[in-house]
Image (cartoon, rainbow, N blue to C red):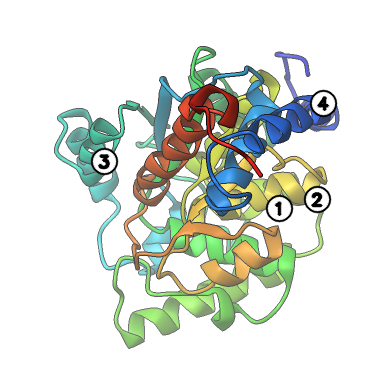
Amino acid sequence: MTHDFATLSDFRTCLAGCTPADDDMRAAADAHNMQLTKPPGALGQLEDLALWYRSWRGGENTEISTPQVIVFAGNHGVAARGVSAFPAEVTAQMVMNFQHGGAAINQIARVNGATLDVVALDLDQPTVDFTQAPAMSEEELVAALQAGWDAVNANADLLVVGEMGIANTTSAAALACALLGGEAAEWTGRGTGVDDAGLGVKTQVVAEGVTLHKGQGDGLETLRRLGGRELAAMAGAMARARDLRIPVILDGFICCAAALCLEHAQKGALDHTVAGHQSAEAGHARLLEALGKPPLLQLGLRLGEASGAALAIGVLKGAMACHASMATFAQAGVSDS
C-alpha cells in the first residue's frame, strides 16, 4: 500500500492493495497454542484472538507493549438541526478535557498502558448540513483521511480509534442506513440522551439525508456525503494500521460506521480488526452483525471517545500474555495425553 494519496481514487487504490493476514504465521501460532499447558480450547475466544493477532504481527512470543489510542474530534453542520442534547461548543470543550487528562478515556488508556493522542479537525469549520448538500468536498474528505493516516504511530503494536463530535451519532446512523438499508428509525438512537421529541427530529434528519444521498457511490463517497471529519480520520487511521500490519480494536457505533465505509469500498478492509464492545446505542448490535464482528465486551456503554475499545485492550493483552508466556507441556514436564 502506498503512503501517498492525493485524491479519493488514490485512497481506493491504497485499500485495494491491502496486504492479507499471514496464514503461515497463523498456522505456526496454532501449533504453539496446542502445546500450551491447558486443555485444547480451554481459553476460549482468547485463543482465537491470539492466533488472529499473530497472523498480523508475527513473532513467537509476542506480547502487547505499545498500544495507541487516538481520539479524533470534528464538528457537524447538521448539529444546527437540534439532533443532540448538547451544543456544538461541547466538542472543543471535551477536546480540552482530553488534553488535560480529565475524561474517561484518559483513565482507561492509562490503566491499560496505552498512549493517548487527540486530533482536532477544523473545529471552527463544521461540515455542511448533509440534508442540504454533501457534508464534505472531496478535498476535505481526503484531508481528513490523511490526518487519520498520519496520526498512527508506526511503532504501535495495537491501535484503538475513537471520536468526539456533537451530532456524530446522527451521521453514523445515516451512514449505516444508507449502506445497509432499512428505515431511519431502525438506526437512530438517543445519542447524548435526546428526549422523545429530539429523537423524532433526529430520525427525520437521518431520513432526509439518506433520501438525498443514498445510492450515489461506494462507502467512501457515502462517507463524504453523510460523514464527518472525525469519522473520515478514523477510517484513514484504520487503513494506515492495515498498511503497517497493526491490529485494530473497533469502538462503538460511530467508529463502526466509519469502518463500514471502508468495508463497503473494499471487501476485507477490516480483516485486521476486532470489535471491542457492543454499545447501548440503537443500531450498534445490528451494525456489528453486518460487519461480522462479535463484540469482546458488552457493558452498556454509550460514551464514545474510544472508551469501550480501550477497555478491551486488557482482553487482548491477556490473550497475548497467555499465548506468549505460558509454559508448553514439554517445558513444564506435564504430559499432554
Position of 61 relative to 23 (above/below): above
Q: Residue at x 14, y 38 (%)?
A: 102
- Give the amino acid at mark 2: Asp
- The location of residue 86, given as percent across then percent down, is 25, 61
Residue bearing the label numbered 4: 24
- Discs 1, 2 touching: Cβ within 8 Å: yes
Residue bearing the label numbered 2: 218
- Give the amino acid at mark 4: Asp
Q: Residue at x 52, y 79 (%)?
A: 204
Residue bearing the label numbered 3: 108
- The location of residue 212, given as percent across then percent down, is 70, 67
Q: Pick whichever of labels 2 and 3 is earlier in the sequence.
A: 3
Q: CA distance from mark 1 to mark 3?
A: 32 Å
Q: How crowded is the residue under tag 1: few (<14 C-alpha within 10 Å), some, or many (20+)?
A: many
Q: Is residue 86 left or right of 135 when viewed as pictured?
A: left
- The location of residue 93, given as percent across then percent down, is 20, 42
Q: CA distance from mark 2 to mark 3?
A: 35 Å
Q: Nearer the viewer, mark 1 or mark 3?
A: 3
Residue bearing the label numbered 1: 222
